[in-house]
Amino acid sequence: MFDWMRGFVRNVELMCEGVPLAAIARETGTPVHVYSTAVLSDRYRRLDAAFAGYPHRLHYAIKANATLAVVRHLRALGARADANSLGEIEVARRAGFSPEEVVFTGVGKTPDEIQRAVAAGLEAINVESPGELDRIAAAARGQHRAARVAIRLNPNVDAETHPNITTGLPDTKFGVSVDEARTMVRRAMAEPGVRVVGLHVHVGSQITKAAPLRRMAAAVTTLAAEWRHAGVPLEHLDLGGGLGVAYAPDQTALTEGEYAEALLPLVRPTGLTLVLEPGRWLVAPAGVLVTTVLDLKRKAGGGWFVVVDAGMTDLLRPALYGAWHEIEAVRPRAGETMLADVVGPVCETSDTIGVERQLPALEIGDLLVIRDTGAYGAVMASNYNRRPIAAEVIVDGGRSTLARRRQSIDDMLQWDT
């Protein structure tokens, strides 16, 4: 709630850092994503301060929100970058990051991505498999250089989160087992084309409990101690990201202090620099999605359907994960509240943003705001039903700026032949 109130406050109507959301909607149309730099700054500084006193780097996970204005702001705050594709590496470059500030993760790196990542001289390429290690080594030999790599461990740790975003169990596609990691590091040490600088792990997203984080850190630090004793020149431990947020009123999440308390006691004895890859925790509360009520339909069993112009093409999380986002009116009307399902215009029953929500009295044309959409919102948008991608606006100190213009139909169809 602190983050919400810091950037988005109500004075009769909802505002973002003093700018009325209704004014933004009038200027850009809806649906529109709106981001608060005040919240971004507050979140980053709090997380950075939680790990103060121990060498650490915060590599922002670009996959959470790849909008250049957002990425640039986080870089200005001191963040580095975590990229999952060549496209995200280019986002990092355009946002001003140097190659030495970027780690490259991803379970399916293409030959072109490997060649370019090696040529760029990134901080580290997080290696997902023995075969990928061979391909990186071959690319490095061909370029007469040594690639900096970190081996991604799959530690068999249940993140206790949604199955679709759990990445640390053996039946997921991510990383390698402890035994396989041992084999890989021996091969890497004999390979002049690679330099093992780190050990990497990421067990899931939207983690809200400390126990899985401690189990993850214990597995990694134990293996790191073994490797250093064997002469592996490790420089850092990359413990990934995944720190969750409380989307619903009855949800709880770890504070940044609790996150640090779960990791630092295990990492500190290693003396290795700690790398973290925060994404959702930094940007989710910094964004909202503003949408217009298109229709009000009575449900056969009682209540209402509130049809809005934002759908699963603008915010996929409810359809994909059954995720909860708070929904409220930008300017509430007086009158009886209504029990409603908030649904989008896409031709799918799963295009439902919220079920059985208690909303104020509404009329067609009213604006609703969907909260905590700064992460995995605009970045997961699609053109399904040939719907153009929504606009994005960033607000900084009372000034709103168009961060990404609304896609036109011509934009969308320009590659069709």
Image: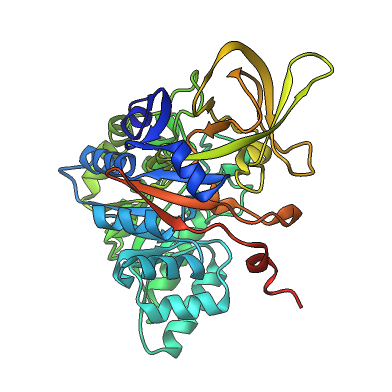
Query: Which residue is found at the position 27% from the left and 66% from the top?
Result: 233
Count numbered badges in the picture.
0
Query: Which residue is found at the position 34% from the left and 35% from the top?
Result: 7
Nearer-the-camera pick, 180 or 135 = 135
Where does the C terminus fall, quadrant-wise?
Answer: bottom right
Where does the N terminus fall, quadrant-wise?
Answer: top left
Q: Is 383 located above or below residue 321 in the figure?
A: below
x, y (%) of residue 164? 62, 42
* Colour logic: rainbow
x, y (%) of residue 260? 28, 36
Nearer-the-camera pick, 283 or 60 = 283
Nearer-the-camera pick, 386 or 128 = 386
x, y (%) of residue 313? 66, 48
Q: Is residue 73 visible?
A: yes
Q: Is 391 located above or below residue 252 in the figure?
A: below
Query: Which residue is found at the position 55% from the left and 31% from the top?
Result: 325
In the rendered view, does 60 fall on the left or right side of 333?
A: left
Corner quadrant of residue 67: bottom left
In the rendered view, does 175 fall on the left or right side of 234?
A: right
Nearer-the-camera pick, 81 or 292 = 292
Query: Which residue is found at the position 79% from the left and 44% from the top?
Result: 347
x, y (%) of residue 234? 29, 62
In the rendered view, does 379 fall on the left or right side of 412?
A: left
Corner quadrant of residue 349: top right
Q: Is residue 193 visible?
A: no
Give the residue at the far right of this rendering: 300
Give the residue at the far top of this rendering: 336
